[in-house]
Image (cartoon, helix red, strand yellow):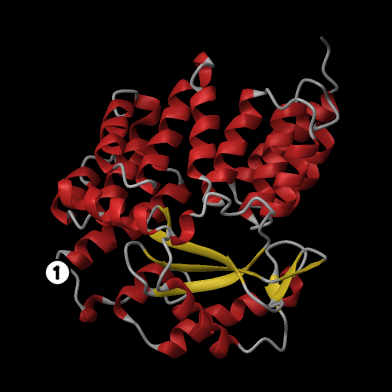
Amino acid sequence: MTLNIDSKQAFFNGQECWKKNDYINARYWFEISYHNDHFKIESLSKLIQIEIKEGKYAKAREILNNHQDINSPILKQIYGLLENIENNFEQSKKYYSECMHTPDMQYQSLLALAKLNVQTGDYDIASKMYQTLQLNPKFYIQSTIGLICLNILEKNFDDAKQYIMKIDQSKLTPKLTQHYRILNAYIKYFLGQLKASDNKYDPIRDYMIYRLFNHSEETLLFHIEKHRNQLEKMTNGCFFKYTDIKRLLLDAREKIENMNGNHFEVSDMYRFRLDTPIGYKGEFITNDLCVVTMIGTKDIITMYPVSLSDEFDKEGLSTSEQLKLKRLQGGIKR
């Protein structure tokens, strides 16, 4: 099959923009390459992932549901990711397990299942999966980061330190290098190896680390205020100009107190619907909020509008006492 060179170049341009987190231009290029049959599914996958990255979960599910090739392993993987994000862990497991039957997706699916087992409180199973993935050089860094995050969640900071010391920093991409810095700072902080006097981090560029030392309400509100930027209405979304951020923060703290967080690396994410609109996601007004805390805590780092789908939390796990207990027991066993 002879490829249309414009579509082929568009796909690779999209890949480059994707790696740089430039989702505006990535979307532009993938929308072009989508029309070439050779790149159709991969381009569609990236377009849906961009919607997910921007917190447009309703739009991501709409695109998936409207696509005919629901048996594509690549799209099943995206379905699994979306169900994980929207707290439907059993459905997510079903999709990821089906992808395990596709030989060239087995390691990727095993990584996804390991992360999912962290969500469900099956920490021993997740740990064994990560350790298995470490045997594959292509997945060594991702699986080791998974083990680091799991040990931070379980407050096994000495073990987390041992794992992070095994990572060769020279092999990290710029994005992973920044992630490494955050993980390393977290571990040192909780081991008492970083003190307030060591806080020379930039409050903007190194916000995640800076917040370890600076717990002021002013710093937090200043950061959240950035999500009021109306210029991001069509991409990342934004709060209304008149949204009372202080009041919203108080409501968020009360709301997440009885919720189970969705673990994402060194953060927990709490997503839920409010009674009144708070801002925009694209051209749509939304009532939905994502609150981000330090992993395993209720210490809020930031919050911003999202757009949840009608399938959100259909398994009821966001407030499940059974899941809360299982996570506690999973942490205690080890």
Q: Is residue 79 above or below residue 21?
A: above
Image coordinates of residue 147 in percent, x first then y, are: 28, 43
Residue at 81% in and 32% down: 34
Classed neighbour count for the residue bearing mark 1: other residues with Cα under 10 Å, few (<14), some (14–19), many (≥20): few
Q: Is residue 31 above or below residue 106?
A: below
Image coordinates of residue 281 in percent, x first then y, are: 73, 65
Residue at 34% in and 41% down: 170
Report the side of 7 relative to 253 (left or right): right
Q: Is residue 239 above or below residue 41?
A: below
Amino acid under disc 1: Gly
Image coordinates of residue 62 in percent, x first then y, are: 76, 45
Q: Nearer the viewer, residue 312 or 247?
A: 312
Report the side of 248 relative to 328 (left or right): right
Tell me the quarter of the picture where residue 236 sits: bottom right
Whether residue 26 is visible here, answered yes or no, is no
Image coordinates of residue 200 in percent, x first then y, are: 31, 76
Task: Name the residue carrying label 1.
Answer: 192
Residue at 42% in and 34% down: 113
Residue most extreme to the top: 1
**Which quarter of the image is occupied by the N terminus?**
top right
